[in-house]
Every structure is written in structure tokens, then in C-alpha cells.
Amino acid sequence: MKFTGEISIPAPRDAVYAKVRDARFFASCVEGVQDLNEIDPDHYTAVLETKVAYLKFKFNVVVEVVRADPPHEIEAKIEGTPLGIVGRLTASSLTRLVDDNGGTKVSYEIDAALTGKLGSLGQPVLRSKAKEMERLFSERMRAAFAKSETPT
Amino acid sequence: MTPFELVEPTSLHEAIALLDPDDSAVRPIAGGTALMLMMKAGVFRPTRLVSLRNLGDRFSRIAAGPDGHLTIGALTPLSVVERSPEVARVAPVIPRAMRRLSNVRVRNVATVGGNLAHGDPHMDLPPVLIALGAKVSVAGPNGERDVAVEDLFAGYFETVLAKNELIAALHIPPQGKSRAAYLKVTTGSDEDWPALGVAVEIEAEGLLAKSERVVVSAATEKAGRLKAAERALTGVAIDDRTLAHAGDAAAAEAECIADVRGSAAYKRELIRVYVGRAVRAALNSNGATH
């Protein structure tokens, strides 16, 4: 299951890269992330909760930054163990930053797979939630940079 | 399992009052065959379940009007619908579809209303009911309203029902000269959840199609009509060429989703082939097969 997208941010690439690489900021842009814990600068754990209708899916997530090439690319691996349901979530993501008329174009590719009982139930859930999560993510990213641009 | 409250109201009014319009951890439960699976899977943790079992006989009756209109109480078990002579007379496609709907143990317990309110796109009954032009009576704190089954589903496991509304009855209009069929495609065992469900209702003079409904389920986020495929069939003679054309239109229109039963591309090809087969099955049905 692949998700791709692009977000334009009116800020220089170095600044955007620094923000995206900051796990706390990044997690604050993803809906449903709680209890982010930094093991080391390349490894994090968190709890991800997502809801569709009356169903709730909760995962213990481990994120590993596999490759960081500032200020161009970040490659990460995500492994999730669902709470209360048999299965596993594995995903890889590639985030690219490109200069764009003084601003930055952030493009991402996420390849996610769900196995076990989680796969039959959760895959369409994840897909139907993905659009909403992407929309919120880009809104929060843009809002964060709009805020930092405001003179104090 | 975390503890929860189980309440067993004896009137519809009382049941509605026990539901919470703002809390999705409070749910009605009828047969419970689907809800219990969600609870066992740990994706639904209720704080209160409102059992509908004691609401009385009037919600588990089947009545046929002299014009062929059929009313089925929402708490009627699927196996009762399957064996009902009234249902077999008005809509023989329903008992035919039921034989491969889960297994007899589930059908003995699961109810018509629960099957619809659950909002799972893999259910076999919703596409059939959409094809038949059925509607449901929905009861809520402000009285009753009618919702076409076609408009009931809002997304994956989501319906347009408010959290404190209940389906009270299902209404199937007279079917006249229409014929219908439902084809279920499983990639696992025969009675498994479908990778694709296609329901077709068609009224034809000889081989000339006058009106039709083409409905797809399981391969998509929710059961729904494929209007482009319907347009491709309206007013034309049904032959291999028009069926292939309708299949192409359906495959282009349906927004397929991938899951453990197949990729989106695979399901799109299934639709391309099975829409034509379902139309043929409906035309050849005469209440006998499929």
C-alpha cells in the first residue's frame, strides 16, 4: 500500500529540514501520535492511535531513521505492533526536500504493509484514514512555518 | 476484555434513550455476530451495550403487502428471511444470496438491521438490497425517517445513522417484472468474505434493457451503485459487446481498495468480468439459480 504526496512550505530548505528532522515537531504534525520517546537521535518509540467509525486501532510504534542526508533526504523505517489484535505494521518512508522559488517542496513516499488479522481489518481503515492524516499533516506543517515567520 | 455495562430495554423508545449521541463506545447490539468479532479483535471496547433482543415481536416480523411490497422487521434473523415464502416470492435473489452468506450458525443469530447498521462493505446483503431499491425506517429521539439503503453507507464501517438512531424495519418495493442476481467472488473458501460482490437488478423486454441497477461491494470502501455501467446498459440490446462495454465502464468507475483478498488492480479486473456475468445471471434467473 503506497502513499505519496507533496507539500509546499514557504521557508528555506535548511530550516524545513531541521524541523522535519526534529522528531518531537514531526510527531506533533501526525494525528494520533502519543508518548514519543527518543532512544537515540535515530531511534524513537511512540504510540499511534487511529479511529474509524467506532473502531479504534492502537499501535506501539518503533521508528528508525535509516539514512539522513541533510538537507535533501530522510529515509525511515517504521514497525508497529498493534495492541489487542494479532498482526504487524511495517512501513518505509522517503522524504525529499527540494528548493522551490525560495520555499521548499517536501515530497514523501510511504510504503506500508499490514499483516495478520490486522491486515484484513486494518488495511482499508488505514487507507481511508490516510487522506485525512495527510491533510492534517500538511496543515500543521504549514501552520508551524507560518507561525515562525510572524515577527515577534 | 474490559468490563462494560449490558442493558436490555423492552421498548424502542427506552433503547434510543440509552444510546449516547456523542459516545461511540456505547453501541446497540442485536445478534452481535459482527460486533463480538470486533470486541474479540480488541478494536472495539464498549462502555455500554444496548441489547435489542427484548424489544418485542413486532421488530422481527415479515409482512408482504398485496402489491408485493415487503416489510421485514430489523430484528428478524437472516435465516428466517432466507426461509420466508414471502421473501422468496417477492425477491428470490435474497434467499439465493443467503446460502453463501457466512454460515448457518451465524445466519441463525445475525439480524437484518444489524447486517445493515454494521456498515462493513464486505456484507452480502447490502448490495442486493440496494439493487432491489430497498429503504430502511430509522428511529431516533426525534421520530422516524426513511433512508434508502443506497444512501445508508458513508464509508468503511460508517453509516449516515446517528449514534442514537436504530434501524426499525426494512422495506423492499414491489419488483414488478424486474429480475435480479448477486454474484459473490471469494478468493478463500466458498463461504468466506468476498473479494467482490456484484448485485444487478434489470428489467428487460426480451434482450432490450429498460432499466437496471448495478451495485458493487467488498472491492470498494462501501457498497454502491455504478452509474456509468448502468448508463452503458440502458436502452441497449444485451449482448457480449454491450456487456463488455458495461464491464469496462464499471471497472473505470469503481474505486477499488486493496486488502488481504486481493490488490486493487485484481479487483478491478474482477469487476470488469463479473458485471457482465451478473447481468446474464439476472436475465437468466427466473427465480431458479444464482
Image (cartoon, rainbow, N blue to C red):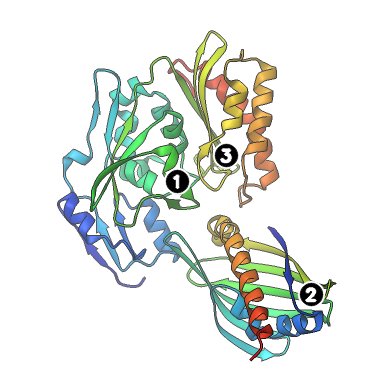
Residue B26's label in the rendered image is none
Extreme residue in the front direction? A151
Where residue A101 appears, x then y in whole percent? Answer: 84, 71
Q: Secondary structure at mark 2?
A: strand
Which label's residue is closer to the chain start, 3 or 1? 1
- Between B74 and B284, the residue placed more toward the observer is B74
- Up the image or down, B157 lies above or below A148; here it is above
Mark seen at residue B153 = 1
Residue at left offset 57%, top offset 55%: A124
Amino acid type at image mark 3: Leu
Say which residue label 2 marks.
A103
Q: Amino acid at mark 1?
A: Phe
- The percent coordinates of residue B257 (x first, y second) are 62, 49
Q: Nearer the viewer, residue A30 or A148?
A: A148
Label 2: how many Cα within 10 Å (few below 14, some 14–19, many 20+): some
**Residue labelled with disc 3:** B196
| Viewer can see residue B101 | no
Task: Tell me the quadrant of the picture where the C terminus of chain A can be found.
Answer: bottom right
Q: At which x and y percent is residue B268?
A: 66, 39
Mark 1 element type: strand
The residues bearing labels 3 and 2 have C-alpha atoms spaced at a distance of 46 Å
Residue A42 or residue A108, whichever sits in front:
A108
